[in-house]
Image: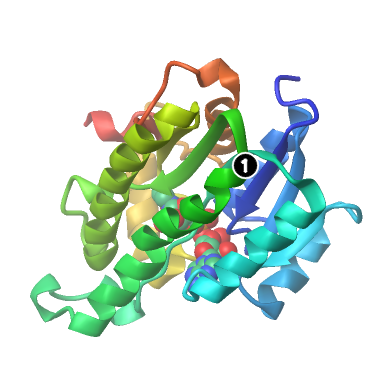
């Protein structure tokens, strides 16, 4: 167990299909204590079904600075220091995940960038004083940041921004021995993905490009996440690691 007694904040569990849940399970298997943040009361009910009764659950809607500040204050009061943070949060309006990118509205663009990219900087700002040296921050991205994937549209643009945020944040935080990295996960059927038009096609094509025709699982993404949070990944700084069973190769 390489994360024994480590405290890791996991943001973005919506249900048992969530990538964040795959991460929480893997982190727990390696001995970590998990602090869950949830977006709203509806999400809290879902997290309560999955978390251990003793786990700390904290509300954090990343659309609001006060909510982020309050969440990290609550975590600090309980734990003082933490050893990792998993950011598995994204949002874009459904109409921005369909049709033409040239039709994306200014407000839709800003919303997707705000929740899916800026939020990493915002939570990193509040987590920084609490993160022990040797900690790892991990976020989730997708191949649509690099290639024009049908209908991924606005989220692809937001993921490109997120990946660059990872690099700048990693450079800044390296001075405090805190590593920041991203995982470029393969397509997985989660709540977020159902917002993308013809998402079933996206998943089918993705699975078809893996060598064994089986898509990546949240557990496989979770295991890489646990590794990146831990000091086993001490030499990995500001990287985006593909965990997509080779989809990016072809
Ligand atoms: P999910 O729907 O299970 O998780 C998305 C989470 O984002 C939810 O828990 C939701 O509550 C949270 N969220 C949205 N707006 C928020 C806000 N304002 N404040 C706080 N939380 C908010 O879906 P998922 O696929 O597990 O998504 C997790 C991450 O993985 C996302 O960044 C997503 O883009 C990324 N990702 C997903 C796939 C995939 O195919 N599912 C592939 C690569 C990357």
| Residue at the spot 39% in from the left edge and 52% down from the top edge | 203
Residue 4, how many percent across, how many down?
78, 25
| Residue at the spot 12% in from the left edge and 80% down from the top edge | 103
- In this image, 155 relative to 6: left or right? left
Residue 241, how many percent across, how many down?
38, 30
Residue 58, how many percent across, how many down?
72, 64
Q: Which residue is mark 1?
A: 23
| Residue at the spot 41% in from the left edge and 22% down from the top edge | 236
- In this image, 167 relative to 148: left or right? right
Frontmost residue, 194 versus 38: 38
Residue 55, how many percent across, how many down?
83, 52
Residue 155 appears in view: yes
Q: How is the image coloured?
A: rainbow
| Residue at the spot 69% in from the left edge and 35% down from the top edge | 27
Check the image and report above or below for 99 versus 130. Answer: below
> Which quadrant of the figure has residue 14?
bottom right
Residue 189 appears in view: no
Check the image and report above or below for 214 versus 124. Answer: above
Q: Give the structural element (helix, strand or loop) at label 1.
A: helix
Residue furthest right in the image: 53
- In this image, 170 relative to 188: left or right? left
Q: Quadrant of the N terminus?
A: top right
Check the image and report above or below for 204 versus 200. Answer: above
Frontmost residue, 150 versus 66: 66
């Amino acid at each position: 167990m390489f994360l024994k007694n480590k405290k890791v904040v996991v943001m973005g569990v919506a249900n048992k299909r969530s990538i964040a849940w795959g991460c929480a399970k893997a982190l727990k298997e390696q001995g970590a204590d998990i602090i869950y943040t949830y977006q709203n009361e509806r999400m809290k009910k879902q997290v309560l079904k999955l978390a251990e009764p003793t786990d700390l659950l904290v509300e954090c809607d990343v659309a609001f600075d006060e909510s982020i500040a309050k969440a990290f204050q609550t975590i600090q009061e309980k734990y003082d220091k933490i050893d990792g943070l998993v950011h598995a949060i994204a949002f874009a309006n459904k109409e921005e995940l369909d049709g033409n990118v040239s039709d994306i509205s200014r407000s839709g663009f800003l919303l997707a960038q705000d929740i899916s990219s800026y939020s990493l900087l915002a939570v990193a700002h509040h987590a920084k004083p609490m993160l022990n040296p040797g900690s790892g921050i991990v976020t989730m991205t997708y191949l649509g940041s690099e290639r024009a994937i049908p209908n991924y549209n606005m989220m692809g643009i937001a993921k490109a921004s997120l990946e660059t945020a990872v690099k700048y944040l990693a450079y800044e935080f390296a001075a405090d021995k805190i590593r920041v990295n991203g995982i470029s996960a393969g397509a997985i059927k989660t709540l977020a993905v159902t917002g993308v038009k013809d998402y079933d096609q996206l998943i089918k094509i993705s699975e078809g490009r893996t060598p064994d025709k089986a898509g990546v699982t949240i557990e496989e993404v979770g295991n890489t996440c646990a590794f990146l949070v831990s000091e086993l990944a001490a030499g990995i700084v500001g990287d985006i690691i593909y965990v997509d069973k080779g989809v990016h190769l072809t």
